[in-house]
Image: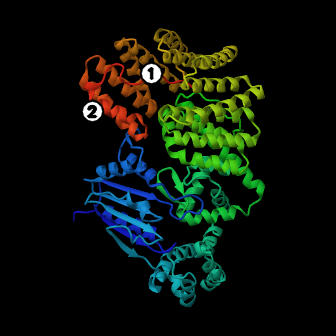
Amino acid sequence: ANAVVVSAIEGMAGVGKTQLAIHAAHELVRAGHFADMQLHVNLRGFDPEFPPADPSAVLEAFLRQLGVPAQQIPGSGDERAAMFRDRMRDRSALVLLDNAADEDQVRDLIPSGPACLVLITSRRSLAGLDGASPHMIGAFSEAESLSLLMRIAGRERVTAEPEAAARIVEYCDRLPLALALTAARLRSRPAWSLPELADRVQAGRLEAIRAGGRAIRPVFDSSYQALPDVAQQLFRLLGLHPGPEFSAGAVAALSGSTVGEATEALELLLDEHLLQQRRSGRFELHDLLRAYALDLVGQDDEAVKEAALARITSWYTHSVYEALTALQKVADPPTVPCVSDPAPLDSHDAALAWLADEETNLEHLMSTAAASGFHDAAWQTGRSLYRLHSESGRDADAVRVSQMAAESARKAGNRPAEGRALCNLGWTYAELGRRRPGAYLDMAEACMRRAVDLCGGAGDEHDKAYVLNGLGKVLGEQSKYAEALDSYGAALTIYQKEGDRGRIGATHCNIGTIHFKRKDYDLALAHLLPSLKILDTPEADSFRIVIVVGNIAEAYFLSGEYDKAHSYESRRLALARTYGYTLQEAESLLNTGDIHYALGNITEARKAWTESATLYEQLDNPRAAEARHRADAPDSNTASARIHRLDACG
């Protein structure tokens, strides 16, 4: 065969598509097939609470599993699909795409290697998917249904009451999931007769048929009611979790239990097939079971739900702060009460891994917190997410979370917090304005002016200085240099009164950027070098150090001191890679290429420019064309051909 084999397993909810696909996958791997790689994802095509999984995000996860470093993963879906096909071309791999919404969702997730097998499950026909072999899965036959009932509830018990067993099969409509769950309850109730259970199932049959997606609700009820009280409570609360998957730590916070107790309860739910686990330490509810849990918890006392939401929002808000701290990002600690101990993130690697797992949940958390009235948790989580998005060059994400944070802060009646969120929004608009001239700088200035009003009116000098610093950034981008220096100077005065060394150093850096724009490189260095001296401490904010070191390298470059420029740029590049600052890495590589070119190292220059272009392309950054041009035509470059600029510190 010269093409990948694609099998589409189709049928109604609860018919056993996922179980069949997983069973087939396990048997194939156990037999020695597809040993190179196995990839599995729940595409959430029919989740009542969350949108279908974004194919681009799925491709990112697949590429990570294939060993592609995060900074090398392209930004666009088409490029990710191309890289995925390339990485899978010579592999013997099995790909399971579970719960697909439609053909479009899975088209880019199919590898091109002829040694690959793709199994797709969906409730919807995938007839429009080229090359796919459809396999329609219907309900069990009566014999198959009785066999499943016997295997779970016990052969002797079922054969002793054949008429009642036939009734159970009929009332469950021979649906495998309904039969399995009903049989599990029968097994847990040794005193029950089969006729008694058949009567119970019969009572809910019409309701189940009429409920569409809830067609198997009576079976879910039977399974749920067979759980111990603690597991029942936890299962209900899982309906309140804001994201599509969760850890034992998050569930412990949600339920107010210890991590050990939460883990034990989760294992029980796994045994009863009320949870799924696709990778170690992460759990998820099936689409229908999530809806079921949400309906159950909706019947609980409001105080119980409010307490659970307070615990989980607090846990995420404090945990993301701990992650920032572990990554040497200086941040204001949350003011929301720390109801449950945050995730233990005491190392750089642990923080990066936690953020990779929880980033989607954190955005869902913001929405859930805001909708539930926990506005302080929403804007404080948004403040943390803004830093992560902004520092990695993900401007669209930074805009979105800043807008959400500003709205939550407004509803909380916290004017300084609203001002700071608007300042963050304005900062991002200013960054967009540098790369895509247009209305962005006007939008940035409007945000900053409003932020100054909010923070100045509230009388909070610290927050006022924060937004004055942001206003200086915007004014500098608008070439209003005198006004920018005034704004930075006002911020510096406040920080000096407070003794905030980190922000004093950052503001000196920003003042240096204005002198740089005026082409006074000596005066720029007169602020940048002291800035680094102030900031360069073991507890320093890693991103500020990256910015200042890069700025010094640029100033030395345009002063013609190429060896000094190379020394500082090398440090910037190493830091950017260590802390995952992809945009800064791209900027640094572009500058490194210029330095090598100025020193006569043409081969090294082309290599750096090429790497820079690749990273810019992944970020969908317009500077990709500039970097690519320099790599393709190095002889056309001169020391002043590029637009040189410095970055301000937030």
Q: Quote the CA–CA distance across marks 1 and 2.
A: 24 Å
Answer above or below: position of 446 versus 213: above
Say which residue appears at 65% left-offset and 35% top-offset: 422
Looking at the image, residue 582 sits to the left or right of residue 208; the answer is left
Number of the label disc, if any, that sits on residue 106? none
- Give the quadrant of the C terminus: top right
Answer above or below: position of 640 versus 206: above
Mark 1–mark 2 CB contact (< 8 Å): no
Q: Quadrant of residue 470?
A: top right
Q: Can you give x and y, in whole percent of width and height, for residue 524 in the image? A: 50, 13
Q: Nearer the viewer, residue 5 or 511?
A: 511
Query: Disc count in the image?
Result: 2
Regarding mark 2 in the picture, which secondary structure is present there?
helix
Residue 341 in view here? no
Answer above or below: position of 249 versus 165: above
Q: Nearer the viewer, residue 487 or 350?
A: 487
Residue 473 in view here? yes
Regarding mark 1 in the picture, which secondary structure is present there?
helix
Q: Earlier in the sequence, mark 1 or mark 2?
A: 1
Answer above or below: position of 134 versus 62: below
Hey, what amino acid is under mark 1? Gly
Q: Quadrant of residue 332?
A: top right
Q: Nearer the viewer, residue 278 or 643?
A: 643
Q: Can you give x and y, in whole percent of width and height, for residue 421 in the image? A: 65, 35
Q: Nearer the viewer, residue 61 or 222?
A: 61
User: What residue sits right under mark 1 in the picture?
Assistant: 550
User: What residue sits right under mark 2 in the picture?
Assistant: 632
Hey, what amino acid is under mark 2? Asp
Say which residue appears at 36% left-offset and 52% top-offset: 81
Badge 2: residue crowd in 10 Å (few <14, some 14–19, many ≥20): few
